[in-house]
Amino acid sequence: MPLYLPIAELSMNIFLVIGMGAVVGFLSGMFGVGGGFLMTPLLIFSGVPPAVAVATESNEITAASVSGALAHWRRQGVDVKMGAVLIVGGAIGSFFGAQVFTYLKSLGQVDLMIALAYVVFLGSVGGLMFWESMRAIYRQYTGYVPPKLSREDRHKAWIHALPFKMRFRKSRLYISAILPLAIGMLVGVLAAIMGVGGGFIMVPAMIYILGMPTNVVVGTSLFQIIFVTALTTIFHSVNTQTVDIFLAVLLLFGAVIGAQVGARVGLKMKGEQLRALLAVMVLGVCIKMGFGLVIEPEELYSVAEAAEQGGH
Amino acid sequence: MRLLVLIYMLFVTVVLPSPAMALVTDLSNNKIEIRYSFDGAQLILFGAVGTSLKDPDSAPYEVVVVVRGPNSETVVRKKERVGVIWVNNQNITFPSAPGYYAVAATASLDEIAPAAVFEKYGIGFDYLPLVVRSGDDVAAPEPAFREALFRLRAGEELFRQELDSVTKLTQGLFRTDIHLPANVPVGDFIVETFLFQDGKIKDRSRIKLDVGKEGFERAAYDFAHGSPFLYGLTAVVVALSAGWLAGVLGKK
């Protein structure tokens, strides 16, 4: 059943769209990740203009993060003060990311930037995750238990030397506000140019750089993602009119159903196995994007309307 | 609808006195509305040639129908290898290229008239006049970019030539189908019909065709482009409520 999407200006099969949402929802439910880094490439591979894919996926991530954030909120799993600093950083990052996005779109280089960003970030994150999970599986196999590092040991000395210290009670931290601000900014830039929530960067950064306790990490990151992707949605709407609400709602519909099933399957699997599988998928998307850049395209030419690129 | 057009055509050709070789055309539909289920559209152009009924001995006529979509500034880019990756490295801008261009005829164009005639009137892929504005760094010859524009748009079924034919129904009546694909651009279309005889243009007629988004689709499009900030805000509110609803339903 074809459905005409008025903003994307193309017809897509409604079941294909819901199906894509369901598959990514299943995987994100199983792995406990946002899924933006899978959804955006999938939309691009299925013919949605990359700019529309990125902007629309921001919109969908807002929706997909709400229920998770609410659940963590009820369990007191959100550090609001830390979240607020991360949001300020994210807002700045998202604003500049959207500006760069708009500028590159007018030059016809936005697809290249999206692909490069995916290759670099998914390649490094996927590689690290793969290495870490393989080590965990190997250690479990051999029965080696690594000595536990205390939170203070993980906290490096240079971090305490930074100025503008703030107290984050919920995270039991007294650290410079520059760090969460910088992390938030990086995540904001990624949200604007890659159509991701940025959890895959933010969660490790919160644990290993900020030294936040794990019980507030996921809730606080979801809390930040809601606000930053909402802002990103508005920036893209104003700059390039590329947010398709209908596409976003359909994807969400599929994702909600898929996530329910995925979460149940995920419970039956071991953590390090899940991480290894996720790493393989992340690397898979990275390689597919990378091949698109390196291999000589069958069609060297492309056509675009200039009017829709500079904004109005 | 089609029947009405046909009756109207017969009325025009038979009853009304017409000048020599007068050409009358009409479309089965002057307004195409793109709605949520839009998957392309087909419309029919009917035409009548005035004198053919009175003077059956005159030389056979030929018809060429040209449908042009709205013009817009169009960029054609070419990828080149930079280091290990392929990058859009050259581009040429056509300040006013049609978003849709279809040519249908009663015979192949070279049988109808000499190339010079089509060149003069700018009919067909080879002679459609396109102004070019190129960047400073363009090294590749411009025809390659023009060819690429036609090849890519033809691949999307937006540019059509020698795919559709004009059928003569009776001595003086003809018809052709106009195919608009799902990705057709919105705006004002012009359907031009050229009447040829002995390799010369005898008459021409123009009809306007309006392709627009209607109803909900139009409202959404106008909203997104007219007040983008409010649209973005709405998108966020929709996402927040949908997400919340999904969370509530998911728990049960």
Image (cartoon, rainbow, N blue to C red):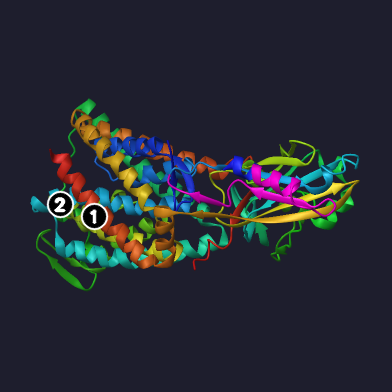
Check the picture and name the quadrant holding the N terminus of chain B: top right
Closer-to-camera residue (B204/A108): B204
Closer-to-camera residue (B77/A289): B77
In the figure, A259 relative to A109: above or below?
above
Which residues, given as a range, are shown in magenta?
B7-36
**x then y, percent, for residue A160:** 20, 66
**x then y, percent, for residue B12:** 71, 49
**x then y, percent, for residue B61:** 84, 43
The residue that appears at 42% across and 41% down in the rendered structure is A42
Q: Are marks 1 and 2 in contact (CB under 8 Å)?
A: no
Give the residue pinned by disc 2: A70
The residue tagged with tag 2: helix, strand or loop? helix
Q: Is residue A69 left or right of residue A117?
A: left
The residue that appears at 40% across and 58% down in the rendered structure is B219
Give the residue pinned by disc 1: B240
Q: Label 1 to label 2, Cα distance in Å? A: 11 Å
Q: Is residue A233 left or right of residue B91?
A: left
